[in-house]
Image (cartoon, helix red, strand yellow):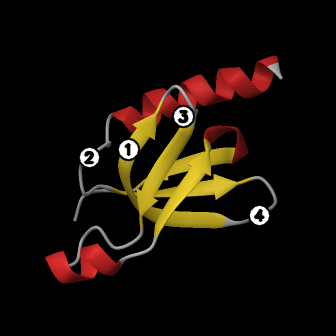
Amino acid sequence: MEDEMANVDVWVYALSSVEGKEQRVTLHLYGGQSLKGAVVELDRSRNTVVLDEYAHGSAATRHESPVHTVLLTAVQAVTIHKEE
């Protein structure tokens, strides 16, 4: 459990630099799944991150894009993509 919380601190630190921007990230989750999107919000009290899949699109696309809330304890690795 202690290792899990240490990882959460690392993910909060890494993702806080791109929070609220349109910077693309990939969250690699335990179990092999991964999610791509832009970090909309980091909830430090709940240890969750909210990802918007299509943050780059038009306002209409953004409004309809899937949004995922992920527990930071489920994150195995984070990739922050270069800005285009």
14 relative to 55, above or below? above
Q: Is residue 11 left or right of residue 74?
A: left
Position of the N terminus, as image quadrant, is top right
Q: Is residue 25 above or below residue 12?
A: below
- Cα distance between the residues tagged 1 and 4: 23 Å
Compute the Cα span from label 1 to label 2.
Answer: 7 Å
Look at the numbered discs 1 and 2 and tell me whether their residues touch, using CB distance below 8 Å.
Answer: yes
- Which numbered dot is residue 41? 1
Q: Earlier in the sequence, mark 3 or mark 4?
A: 3
Q: Return the residue at label 2.
A: 20
Which numbered mark, 3 or 1, is in the foreground of this view?
1
What residue appears at the point 63 percent right and 46 percent down from the top-left corner? Answer: 77
Do residues under tags 3 and 4 come within 8 Å of each other at their CB atoms? no
Under mark 1, the amino acid is: Glu
Residue 39 relative to residue 75: left or right: left
**Image point (34%, 73%), residue name:** 54
Expressed as whole percent of the image width and height from the top left, the position of residue 21 reads 23, 50
- Compare marks 3 and 2 and give the one earlier in the sequence: 3
The picture quadrant where one finds residue 64 is: bottom left
